[in-house]
Amino acid sequence: MTHAFTNAFTPGDRLPLSFDEALDAILLQADGRTTTPEWVALAQSLGRALSAPVHSRVALPPWDNAGMDGYAVQRADIIGATRASPRLLPVLGMSAAGADPTALPWVQQGTALRIMTGAPMPPGADAVIRIEDTDEGIAQVAVFDDRDGNGRANVRPRGEDVAAGSTLFARGTTIGASHLGVLASIGAHSVSAYRAPRVTIVSSGDELVMLDRFDEVEAGQRIVSSTSYALPALLRSAGADVRTLPLVPDTLRALTTALAGALDEGCDLLITTGGVSVGAHDYTRDALSALGGRQTFWRARIRPGGPIGTGMVRDVPWIGLPGNPVSTMVTGSLFAWPLIRVLGGHTGCRPLRVPVRFLDSADTPAALTHFLRVVVSAGADGTPEARLAGPQGSNLLRTMALANALLMIPPEVSRANAGTLFTAILLPDVPLMTT
């Protein structure tokens, strides 16, 4: 069910949604709206999502090759070899990495060929003896041990990694650094990937200024619009092409004009920050209603970030994030980041949830899902542990910067006690590292 935007709830409006209900509703906004595919040079494709499966025309490795430095032999020739009774084999030459497989001599019974790691196996040989198990002979080699004649015998078979004609990566795969290496190995000069979603951010607030007006901040007249710097960076980490409009005054006409201009210039997702509550200067719903917008929901049962909404305006998905800096970053991570991933064609979009042991304690009296900013690390027994990143006030952005995860405290828990197992959502733009 959808509702026209209004500046206050009406009796027919739905109750605020739970976290998971809100996330589902927001991701539904991307249904059938994946960006268009385009061909991208391989070196420029990092972080994009494949728009079609990738098949390999070649095998990797392209030939049987050595997994060790040593000597290529026939297995039967080294069975029973010991230091007391070595096997003596004439050495026919050498196979080095990059050698032409068609030019190598045939290793017949009773002969060996010196070989380097990764070098092609010569015809006739089916085992590689480690150089440590020989006398490293040049014209003739003494083999002291027969253990390398067992199993795969230090031979990497052709096509072990990739078989010719096989599917390497499925549609929706996010291209990472190792993907680039594999794609280069099969000769993929370019790939078909989904276009980066175009996201436009519109922020309002008469009290806000950008850094070029910091003198007004020092004079105690204004505050820096910190989310004008933090939110675009967060969304770019999701793969978005972000455009941030100049700060909009707190008037209905100014906000309506700014939103109309953003839609006229074209975007795949419209994000507003601020103006989503019920204050006298919160005009976002009225502005969107004037532009023909429809809302899906307005508010979620979470803290921070309860005043969040989503809907459609001129056939473009819209998310309204709260203007409080911490609330903006929390809801941006929990809702906007996954939506951008879906729009960009990525298979993986939902934040990863992990069980953690809480080492601190916190009061969460309201019957809401609370998201505490925490630092997750490995405990002595291997169980992930979470500590508060600092004070949890919704205006304290530094604590958000120190955190690497959000600890979910269920609505029925009024006090989160130390030692309790909870679920943590890893922040999508923060690498989990240790000292």
Image (cartoon, grey):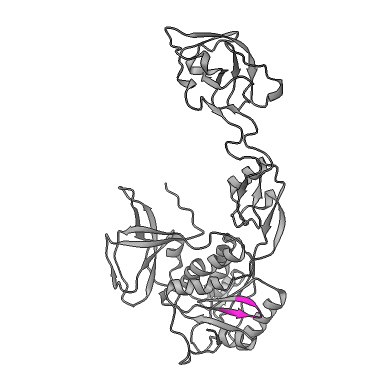
**Image position, residue 90 (x, y; %):** 59, 8
Residue 249 in percent (x, y) is at 60, 83
Q: Is residue 225 visible?
A: no
Q: Residue at x 53, y 73 (%)?
A: 26
Is 126 positioned to the left or the right of 259 in the image? Answer: left
Where is residue 9 drawn, in percent x and y?
Answer: 48, 89
Q: Is residue 236 visible?
A: yes
Residue lying farthest bottom? 11
Determine which quarter of the picture holds residue 57: top right
Is residue 355 found left or right of 194 in the rendered image?
Answer: left
Rendered location of residue 124, percent (x, y) = 62, 19
Q: Is residue 211 above or below residue 132?
A: below
**Which residue is at the front of the view, 156 or 181?**
156
Q: Is residue 68 above or below residue 434?
A: above
Classify 189 as above or below 125. below
Q: Was residue 247 drawn as part of the magenta stretch in this picture?
A: no
- Give the vertical position of 159 relative to 42 (above or below): above
Magenta-tinted stretch? 311-317
For the stretch drawn in magenta, what is the main secondary structure?
strand
In percent of the image, x 67 and y 72: which residue is there? Answer: 267
Figure quadrant of residue 47: bottom right
Q: Is residue 313 magenta?
A: yes
Query: How many discs appear?
Result: 0
Q: Residue at x 32, y 73 (%)?
A: 364
